[in-house]
Image (cartoon, rainbow, N blue to C red):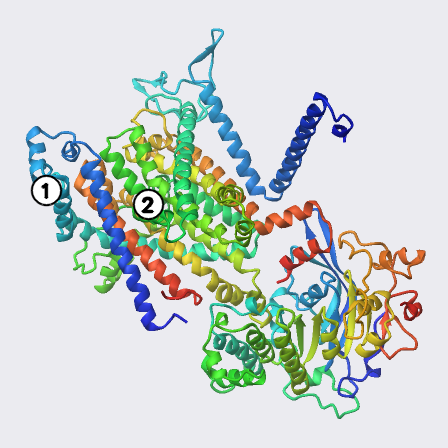
Amino acid sequence: MTARSESTGSGADLNRQLSRVRAWIGQLRSGTRGLYKVLRANPLTLVGFALVVLITLTAVALVIVPPTSAVFGYPISLTPYDPNALLPCPTVGNQSFCAQPPSLEHFFGTDRAGRDVLSRVLTALPLDLAIGFLIAGFALLTGGALGLIAGFWDRPGTLGAAVSLAIMRVTDVFLAFPSLVLALAIAASLGRGTIPSIIAILLTWWPYYVRLTRGEVLAVKHQPYVTAARAAGVAEWRILFRHVLRNIAEPLVVYFTMDVGTVLVVFSTISFIGIGVPPNVPEWGNMIQAYSDYLLIFPWVVLFPGLAIFVTVLAFSLLGDGLRDILDPRSRRALSQAETPTSAPAATATAAGALG
Amino acid sequence: MGRSKGDLVIFVSKRLIQLVAVLFGVVTITFFFTHVAIPNPCYVWSGPRATQATIQQCIDKNDLDKPLLDQYVLYLGKLLSGDWSTSPRGVPVLPTILAAFPQTLELVVAALFLMVVVGIPLGVIAANNSGRWSDHLVRTFYLSGWATPTYLGGVVLSIAIGPLVGLPHSGNFGSIPTFPEPFHMSVLDALVNLNLPAVVDAVAHLILPATALAFINLGIATRMTRGSMLEVLPMDYVKTARIKGLSDFWVLYKHALRNSLISTVTVLGITAGSLLSTSVVIEEIFQWPGVGRYAFESIVKYNFNGTIGVVIFFAVGVVVANLIADILYGLLDPRVEWR
Amino acid sequence: MLPPQPQQRRGRWGDFVAEPLLEVKGLSVDYEVGAGTFHALSDVSLELPAGHVVGIVGETGCGKSTLAHAIPRLLREPPARIRSGEVRFRGMDLLTLPKWKLPLVRGTGISMVFQEPINSLNPAFRVFDQLSEAVRIRKRRETGQAPGVVPGTEGFDYSKREGPKPADVLARPLLPAGPEARKGFSRILHREDFREDALDYLRLVRINDPETILDLYPHELSGGMRQRIMIAMALSEKPSLLIADEPTSALDITIQAQVLTLMKELIDEIRTSILFISHDLGVIAEMADDVGVMYAGHLVEYGPVNDVYEHPRHPYTKALLRSAPNQYKADGPLPSLSGSVPNLSRLPSGCPFHPRCPLAKPVCSDDPGPVLEVQKGTAVGHVAACYFSEEVAGLP
């Protein structure tokens, strides 16, 4: 290796760092290649993954470039029209028809106030998506931390056991409330609006992560390799971070991915009922509620936001559901061996999977 | 082995005690959120249009000027004695909920039935054909159900598909029934009265809301069945069943499913909460006279006591459903000890 | 080339036997996984005459289990793929049968005992439920209430010079249940009717307290007990062919000895033909009449067991036998072969063993490789797939 031939001076350090970077890039490339192979084998997951990437990038772009912005005096906007602008409605005789069906100027049509539906749907995207990530992420962090504590430090007779018991009892109680109903009640009593709704969902969402994380931690804790590590004298915190966290990460990631979609639906439901986002703010649930009675008359005002929700949640669910299959240990082993077929044991493992 | 009849009694009793403890916690948390976490609760409870006099009345009636511990004890007492307070217009909460409950039960049972009858075979098919197009199709189907917000599905079914197919989409009967309703459940009442046209009418009214409720949650049954079947199918005892000469149907539905049902059934019990939540929106859209619609209207019309009453009631429902699921799990899996 | 005509061979009980019960011709099975295709079986041919016990021996990964599962088509079609070949059971090619007809052959035609008794019994049902299910299947087929292969109603009469024709004894090919079968009051036979039969079969496998065992769940039993119950269940359907896939490998040595003794006694009592798979040379020596040696998916040698063990005609067989520990080799390390089993997705050309073979010559790596050939100077029916089989005797 080059590092050895220049064993003195700063040249050695540089070479060592270069080889480390090279190794890292190599890992990245083989990881990407592995990811590509895996995605190709699971077409549904690929669709979900592509959609999720597309949607997230669009949301980010929409945030960076708000509808009314200008570069060097030239107005640029990702949305064709200002979502809140009341555009002039075509009039026939002395009646103005504001709600126009989809056309070339308005791809998704307009609503009764003359606002462009496409712009509103696009504007609602970052809001809904951000709320989904925010709430699910927060619940993952708080619920996950609590679940970790409750699962890992529950040896009977210690302070940890008492704390774990307390955490689990409180979680059980919270889990008894159906989440949507409780969120509605909290939002109703905290006053109505976006922030109270977010707080309401947050308060009802973290218990699920506690239960999930604790279950996973318990399952990992009793594995032989953890016992072996402990017997070898590995420190507790190291066991926690290297063994436990790495192994529970996968089911948590899967659940989180699907949860983003679920939270989105819950938030839009709260908006639909009327106690979430204020009436004229573009939000998918809001938009559907305003025109639900007019479904047969102005279907486009209801269907396009609905389609937006549907596609977004479906994308996340496909990705999460596919991730679960991919990360399942059995298929993971088969996939990793397909990349490096070495010897008969690999064939035996595949054979074992194929028998019966 | 710990599975005698005596053990079963202990098993159920232990869980009943846990149930009481959890319910106690539920009530306490509710108290916390309604009496403690909100400053000046009566401002919120009396609604946005309350006058000072109404608020003062509310404070007196709800003992809000007493020390917190006294409030708590009084609160518990009232709940247990059935005094769940009243709506702003004076309609008592608990009797309303109890009267509306059987309708919701009927709807939930119908939805569960659909989920089991449609969802489980779909999960079996998906697992059996894992990786092939039917698997992808089933997965897309149930993920679509999951991705459709409750209200959207309900609205589409009610306003678009209902008239298209000719099914009624409002209420649980076409016209107010003229026969006695001992059960307060539309189909059962009509059956008990041997009134065939009413039975048909009741079932017709039940179809759309039950389908809406089930469609969203079909995913749960299908996904659990598919997942646990995928774990069960490679097991040796499935091979044994095949080599005995049983047809594919019996191998799947008797030997494999029996083992994967264990986890599916418990999950179904746990999704009771989700079903109850979903019923709030569905019942409102379809004007189904159940607890869900009462909840919706309480929330929207600032009936705070009604809202809290429903929250507690649903919590009881969820806990009972979890208990049933837990007991079923102990019964279905012969390896579980009844401790 | 296949072993010589069965009419020239004597069965276990000293008689002549007729057409083979099971004929495997040129069976090749691949596993397709990701970027690799593993050739689990390559052109395997063998014949199992009725009334015989044939053993298949080989290392882990040589394809014996695949062969055992391929015959009743228990392989999961993806990832496994049967590339070519025939599996004739009682004259029917199982590989071309439509899938829905396969259950009709299984159970009463071909049955199987697996390696891991822990997983082989359904944990959700009692022993009685599972055993009586098997008995019920057989009874329904015997009375014609359900279609399926039917076991012979009388045993072989081995006193006859000319063996019985399969069509006579192992009667009735696949027939739908005809109207003549439903004579009298045909009711669905209920599980309870089979209590006595279930008890009989449990006693057959030397279980001492069958009444108690019947009501237990599998997780309440020991491994040896479970394996006996598996054997009882398989035999209760009176199969013409029983495939035993390493039935004792997962048991401890004492239980293993008990189960093997049991199986030997049963073979003589019931006279089911058995295909016995094992990696243990000693077990095969005890149980089998003929043995086939497999290596890397190929059948490299086949013949009467004593002859193959005493006069191996394939270098791999010789090496295998040499490396088996026995009480006479007390000094020095166990001899072993250099190299390792080839990757099944990258088999060597020609003979699969040639990279490790002490007798290898250039011709050994030419495709196609050596085929099974009759070995002169050995017992009748002894074949080996080696160009230089005569030199094997001279190996150390």
Give above or below for C308 relative to B225: below
Q: Name the quadrant containing residue C100.
A: bottom right
Name the element at disc 2.
Answer: helix
Residue B104 at least partly seen: no
Give above or below for A338 relative to C306: above
Give the mark, 1 or 2, whose residue is nearer the N terminus: 1
Provide residue C70's location: percent of width, then percent of height: 69, 65
| Tag 1–tag 2 contact (CB < 8 Å) | no
Name the element at disc 1.
Answer: loop
Provide residue C262's location: percent of width, then percent of height: 63, 82
Q: Residue at x 56, y 72 (%)?
A: C223
Of residues C359 and A77, the one nearer the viewer is C359
Residue C264 at least partly seen: yes
Does residue C394 appear to the left or right of B309 in the view shown?
right
Q: Chain of mark 1?
A: B
Give above or below for B137 relative to B239: above
Q: Residue at x 31, y 66 (%)?
A: B10
Q: Which residue is mark 1?
A: B90
Does residue B272 appear to the left or right of A238 in the view shown?
left
Does residue A107 appear to the left or right of A279 in the view shown?
right
